[in-house]
Amino acid sequence: RSCLIRHQSIHTGERSYKCSECGKGFPISTWLLDHQCVHAEEWPFCCSDCGKVFTQNSNLISH
């Protein structure tokens, strides 16, 4: 049941988890944790076309 509720929050636009650095909201707590790495500068690989960042160069290349 909790998985269904979490999944539904993606579609409803609910953003219960807020970043304390920038205020950006996320429907799933792990997405917030991933986002917080941006502020900790743990994402050294950045796409020059769209700005998306990655922790590994192989992920950037796949992107």
Image (cartoon, rainbow, N blue to C red):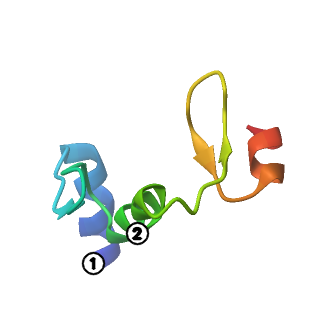
Q: Secondary structure at mark 1?
A: helix
Judge whether residue 36 can be spotted in this image: yes
Q: What is the residue that sits farthest to the bottom in this orientation? A: 1
Q: Give residue 2's mark.
A: 1
Q: Amino acid at mark 1?
A: Ser
Quarter containing the N terminus? bottom left
Which residue corresponds to the image point at 18% horizontal and 54% vertical from the top-left? 15
Residue 22 x, y percent position in the rendering: 23, 50
Badge 2 local density, few (<14 within 10 Å), some, or many (20+)? few
Q: Quadrant of residue 4?
A: bottom left
Residue in view at x 40 percent, y 69 percent: 33
Q: Quadrant of residue 50?
A: top right
**Relative to 61, 47 lies left or right:** left
Determine which quarter of the picture holds residue 9: bottom left
Q: Is residue 62 left or right of residue 15?
A: right
- The residue that disc 2 covers is 33
- Quarter holding the C terminus is top right
Outermost residue toward the top in this view: 49
